Each structure stands twice: as C-alpha cells, then as structure tokens.
Image (cartoon, grey):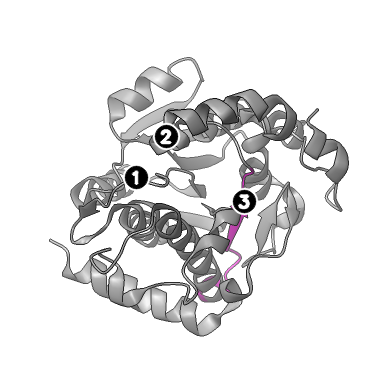
Amino acid sequence: MSIVGLIRGKGASGFGYNSTAEEVTEGLDLKGKTYLVTGANSGLGLETTRVLASRGARILAAARTAEKAREATARFGDVRPLECELSSLASVRACVDTVKREGVSLDGIICNAGIMALPRLQTTHGLELQFFTNHIGHFILVTGLLDTLTASGRVVMLSSDLHKSAPDVGIEFDNLSGAKGYNPWKAYGQSKLANLLFARALARRLKGTGKTANALHPGVIVTNLSRSIPAVARGAMSIISPLVLKSVGQGAATQCYVATNQTLGGVSGEYFADCNVARSSPISYDTDLAERLWVESERIVAGLN
C-alpha cells in the first residue's frame, strides 16, 4: 500500500486509491457484455482488457496495429484485436467500419489510449499531435460508434488531473496546430481537458437515453504513456513509484469501475478519481466551452480527407 493510499483511504463507493481493477470488478458476471478498449496492448488498457475478459466480457482490443493487440491479448479469452491508430483518420474510420460491419453491440467504449508530453511539436492532419490523438481520434471513434451502444451503454473517457495544466483559456482554438507556441505539458493538459469537456458535452446529448458518458483520472502510474518523458525523470519516477505512485492494477481500477459498476447506471457527465466522483478544474464545467469544442471538432472532422 502506498503512502498516498494510506492517507486517502476509501470513498463513498467503498473503493479508493489502493483499489485494483480486480477488486472493483470482483463478483461481476460480464458474460454477454462487449467493451471496446483503446490502447489495449499495454499499460492500463492491457490490464483493463485482462480483467474484464476474466469476468466473462468480450473485448474489442484496439491498438496501433491489430498485430500488437493480438500479441498482447492472446491469452485473455474472448478478445477481438483491432487496428485503431488514433492519429490516423483512415485507421480510426476503418475501425469504426469494422465494428459496424460485424454488427457488434457495445456495452462500453473505454477511451484509454493516449500520448503524453511530446518534447517537441509534432503535427498530424494540421493539428498538434497530442490534441489530435487524445481528443480528435477518440471523438471520431466515439461519435462514429454511438449507434452501436446498447440502451445502457457507457462511454468512459480517460482524462487526467493534468487537465488543470491546460492554457488559462482552456482550449486554444487559435493555436490547435501549435504553430503559435508549444509547451509539452500545456498541450497535454489541453488534450486531457478536451477529453473531459467532450465527455460532458456527450453526456448532455445522451440525456434521457439510458446511455452515459463520464471522464476520469486514473492516477499517476509509470506506463508506456511516459515514454516521451526524459530518461532521468522516468528513472526518478521508477524509484519513488512504490511509495507514491499507483500500480497498473490500481491505475486501471477507476475505468473498470466506471465502465461496469451497477450503481452507476444513471450517472453521466461526471469526473471520477480513485473510483469516486471528484471535482475537476473550474473551466471544465464551462458548458459554452464544451459546446464550442464539440462544434469545432465536428468542423475539423468534416474537413479531413
């Protein structure tokens, strides 16, 4: 148990900082349920895939290549590997088409994949790479698959408490390419704020349908997501991790909880941390900002080819 976990304890849900994905799904029978998980080949996505499959769920395991997903999840039961390179419009659209063509009904879409703090500006489709990969790629995927959700289907967006490091205006609509200035952590924070705003805007659109959308902070974990961080910093993180950082099992707990817990059937538009509803930054509750982001995302997607 970490020092942080000892201090925080458990919340109203009965789970907390130290809870693991196995613990929050203990006793669940997910036979007949199907979940799509992005980034399913490593880190939190792999653990989420493993645990949900062990409870009987069928998993559509999406990764940058179907081969990566297949190799990582081969021992996990009913898993369908899929290619979904979120920085590639063609790849995301092909993933959507495959799911629809196969007639799959989804009980949940767990948007787990992402990239973090790229040290230098990189772009794709004319946009800063973190914004496109973390937000636009998932926006295309989720909006493309909304009609495949079951009547009680859930969209689970991995945000981060680092959404609080976004620019003061929240989303720099006049600098989505990064050409007017780039800071790795502000860009990452902006993309994570976008994930949160997207979940809340989607929740408003799903109101009254029985379908839900929520966002979450998984905690701080050393996974492949940190591969862009300088080696010295990664080394320091690995040294202190037993004391203050979550394990992968603990990091995957909140997304497994939000995706499957039976008490959350009517809960939508919330932000979770440590398997409990949590407060996010003031700007993340800005409805006008969320709506502007939705409209701008639609405009961006419509202009892609």
Q: Give the distance between the C-alpha atoms of the residues marked 1 and 2, in whole angstroms.
A: 8 Å
The part of the image, by quadrant, that contains residue 225 is top left
Which residue is farthest top?
75
Eyeballing the image, is 256 above or below 169? above
Residue that mark 2 sits on = 230
1 vs 3, front mark: 1
Q: Residue furthest front?
A: 232
Which residue matches tag 1? 119
Query: Which residue is disc 3 drawn over?
Result: 217
Furthest residue toward left = 305
Residue found at x 64% / y 43%: 219
Q: Which residues are magenta?
A: 205-219
Residue 131 sits in quarter: bottom left
User: Residue at the location (86% across, 42% down)?
Assistant: 7
The residue depicted at 53 percent of the width and 61 percent of the height is 165
**Rendered-image quadrant of the N terminus:** top right
Of tags 3 and 2, the one toward the viewer is 2
Amino acid identity at mark 3: His
Image spot of residue 266 (x, y percent): 69, 64
Answer with mark 1 or mark 3, whichever residue precedes in sequence: 1
The three-letter code of the residue at mark 2 reads: Pro
Image x and y of residue 70, in percent? 36, 22
Amino acid bearing label 1 = Pro
